[in-house]
Image (cartoon, rainbow, N blue to C red):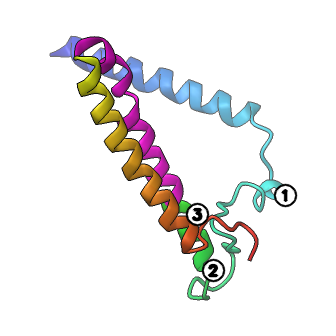
Amino acid sequence: MSMILILSLIMIFISMIFMSISLIISKKSNLDREKCSPFECGFDPKCLARIPFSLHFFLITMIFLIFDVEIVLILPIIPLFLMVNFFIWFKISFFFIIILLIGLYHEWNQNMLNWIN
């Protein structure tokens, strides 16, 4: 029991030393406070949070997430080519790509891909 206590104290002491060294070495000052503040979706974090924002930022985020999920679903199709019959692989790949193209066509018709408003 005393060994665990001694090791715990040593770990706390070492972490305090590292934290002290990082505070001494760091170059942060009060002038960098604005630069280190979070910036998200065009908001100024120092003002009122209930101001209206552009829906365009939300749509871009959703499209990005959808394309990320599509990439995650496409990657397993590559090793699947070696495991199954070519015609089965072609049907699965073709069906998946058709679904993606229909989604892309829908986004295009809704002007979601128009970056300039």
Q: Residue at x 49, y 20 (%)?
A: 14
Q: Amino acid at mark 2?
A: Ser
Helix or strand or loop: what does disc 1 sit on? helix
Question: What residue does disc 2 label?
Answer: 54
Q: Quadrant of the N terminus?
A: top left
Label 2–label 3 contact, CB within 8 A? no
Q: Residue at x 40, y 28 (%)?
A: 75
Q: Closer to us: mark 3 or mark 1?
A: 3
Q: Residues under labels 1 and 2: Cα distance?
A: 30 Å
Residue nearest the viewer, comparing 24 with 92: 92
Which label sits on residue 78? none
Q: How many marks?
A: 3
Is 62 included in the stretch rendered in magenta?
no
Label 1–label 2 contact, CB within 8 A? no
Question: How far across and how far down the image is residue 25, in percent?
Answer: 75, 31
Q: Residue at x 45, y 38 (%)?
A: 71
Magenta-highlighted stretch: main secondary structure?
A: helix
Between discs 2 and 3, the one toward the N terminus: 2
Q: Amino acid at mark 3?
A: Ile
Question: How far across and how far down the image is residue 33, in percent?
Answer: 75, 59
Question: What residue does disc 1 label?
Answer: 31
Helix or strand or loop: what does disc 3 sit on? helix
Residue nearest the viewer, comparing 76 with 62: 76
Helix or strand or loop: what does disc 2 sit on? loop
Question: Quick check: 110 left or right of 43?
Answer: left
Question: Quick check: 6 left or right of 84?
Answer: right
Residue nearest the viewer, comparing 82 with 22: 82
Q: Closer to us: mark 1 or mark 2?
A: 2
Which region is colored magenta? 63-84
